[in-house]
Image: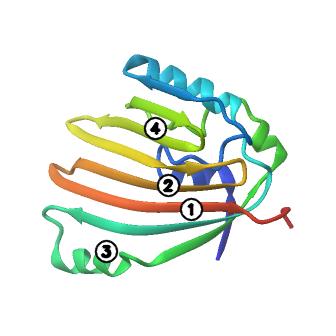
Amino acid sequence: SMKIKFRGLVLCAAAVTLAGCGEDKPANVVATGEAANAAAKATSQSFRPVPGHWDVTMTMKEYDVGGMPEGIKEAFQKQIGQATTIDACLTPEEAARDDGKFFVPEKKGCDFQKFSMIDGQFSAEMVCTSGSEKLNVKTSGTYSAESYDMTVNTQGEMNRQPMKMVMHVAGKRDGECT
């Protein structure tokens, strides 16, 4: 397994994958449209994962990009269903940062359309645009202060070709950093 910084892992796994954020009794948040971006920022500033060592497992469930050469397509198809586990250390300083990055992606051009956190259930829809390319990202799953389980479904265009990717991301805190 690999050791990497926790924040980078969260943003790498998926733009809106929830990084175990929450408290034992999280507030309920539901927002759509313009309010969804504000809700995501505000919520991420009030929910915190527990610092420590986290095991994060990412599994590609589906990946298809139109126009992909056969050799490359076959290589991606072999990755489907293969789990990658990553060791991540979340420091108290990272957990306490009030910057909203757990829910709001760093990438410019991404806006939430819907954002919902209700009783440990997470759901978000986001649209990312770059030039003529547009990706729709839907994330849903469960979370607590010490674990999360999310499915990220991304559809749209990449290099003017249709693309679809489905990824499962699960994380669980399993002790202190060493």
Provide the secondary structure element on which disc 2 rests: strand
Give the CA separation, mark 2 to mark 4: 20 Å
Give the CA separation, mark 3 to mark 2: 21 Å
Left or right, 139 with reference to 159 = right
- Residue visible at 15% across and 61% down in the picture: 66
Of badges 1 and 3, nearer the viewer stands 1
Look at the numbered discs 4 and 1 and tell me whether their residues touch, using CB distance below 8 Å: no
Residue type at mark 2?
A: Met
The mark found on residue 76 in the picture is 3
Q: Which residue is mark 2?
A: 150
Image x and y of residue 8, in percent? 61, 52
Residue type at mark 4?
A: Lys
Look at the numbered discs 2 and 1 and tell me whether their residues touch, using CB distance below 8 Å: yes
Residue type at mark 1?
A: Ala
Image x and y of residue 37, in percent? 47, 24
Look at the numbered discs 1 and 3 and tell me whether their residues touch, using CB distance below 8 Å: no
Q: Which residue is mark 1?
A: 170
Q: Which residue is mark 4?
A: 107
Provide the secondary structure element on which disc 1 rests: strand
Of badges 2 and 4, nearer the viewer stands 2
Image x and y of residue 64, in percent? 23, 64
> Which corner quadrant of the image does residue 80 belong to?
bottom left
Residue 131 visible from this viewpoint: yes
Quadrant where the C terminus lies? Answer: bottom right
Q: Mark 3 vs mark 2: which is more N-terminal? A: 3
Q: Mark 1 vs mark 3: which is more N-terminal? A: 3
Give the CA separation, mark 4 to mark 3: 24 Å
Quadrant where the N terminus lies? Answer: bottom right
161, 46: nearer the viewer: 46
Image x and y of residue 85, in percent? 59, 72
